[in-house]
Image: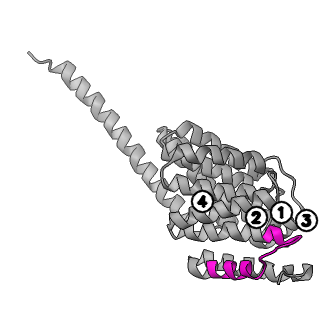
Amino acid sequence: AAFKATDLRFLDTVAEAANFHIQLRRFDEARQMYQSALDRMPTAKGGEQSYRAAFLTQVGTTYLYARNLELAEKSFNIAVEYAEQRLGESSPLLAEALEGLASVYVERKQPDQALPILKRALKIASSTSFTAYFDGIQQQHRRGPSTAEYSIQNTIGILHLSQSNYVEAEKSFRDALKTINRQRADTAVNFIKANSASLFSNLAQAHRGQLEYREAEDALIKSISTAEKLRGSALVLNRAAALLAEVHFEQNDKELDRLFARLTSKKAETNPEN
């Protein structure tokens, strides 16, 4: 039977527990929790519909993280169809389902399929207002306000990075950082601002691709500083530190190459061939 309105707290608990499993990379366990909740509300009503849409998307996410792209694509398509039919074309939960579907195509290196879906998702995420039910699920599911807009901008940037389109990638990552900076600077959204550490690392990759090493270094230092200040992921912190070392190495290599070229040129001028 479908849950009563007062039972939405149970769905909050499912969302929180499943997210914990995802953080520990226990994707099968997380999927089982989402699926169990979905099975118990086959005819979702009221606020349950938002949870059902979110959980359908998260089932796809667990498959995506587990690199099962076929089942991820199938799950995201189900989530998209449900959100379209039950929540409407302007729902931010539809935007999240679309981003998940596009992420499958990004992983498959199919940019022509991914980009139009991401643009549609971004249009929804950047123009929607959030319902009370959506706000409620975000408090548990994401631990704060909606992450849809900046997450989609980040995914678009990653897509451009994969195509070595570094200028467009830089633009997308900067747009994502601007979106984050619009959020209030309070503890309720520190989890979002901590995610800016990942965005700074991605931005550094875009600068690195353009051989803008000073800008890449600055972005990585901001990534490390943000992660330390807001107690972000240790994985993000380590990744930024490793990238910073790589950028320093590459920068020194480029300087040595330029120095060698100048020395070779001068030697050729001093000792011209007969």
Above or below: residue 186 compared with residue 23: above
Q: Quadrant of the N terminus?
A: bottom right
**Amino acid type at mark 4:** Ile
Label 2 residue SS: helix
Observer able to see residue 49: yes
**Amino acid type at mark 1:** Asp
Stretch of the chain drawn in magenta: 31-51
- Residues tagged 2 and 1 counted as in contact (Cβ below 8 A): yes
Q: Which residue is mark 4?
A: 224
Above or below: residue 258 compared with residue 215: above
Mark closer to the chain start, 3 or 1: 3
- The crowding category of the residue bearing disc 1, from other C-alpha atoms within 10 Å (few below 14, some 14 to 19, many at least 20), is few
**Amino acid type at mark 2:** Asn
- The crowding category of the residue bearing disc 4, from other C-alpha atoms within 10 Å (few below 14, some 14 to 19, many at least 20), is many
Q: Residue at x 89, y 70 (%)?
A: 46
Mark in front: 4 vs 2 = 2
Q: How is the image coloured?
A: one colour
Mark closer to the chain start, 4 or 3: 3
Mark identifier at residue 190? 2
Q: What main secondary structure does the magenta stretch of the protein show?
A: helix
Distance in Å between CA atoms under marks 1 and 4: 20 Å
- Residues tagged 3 and 1 counted as in contact (Cβ below 8 A): no
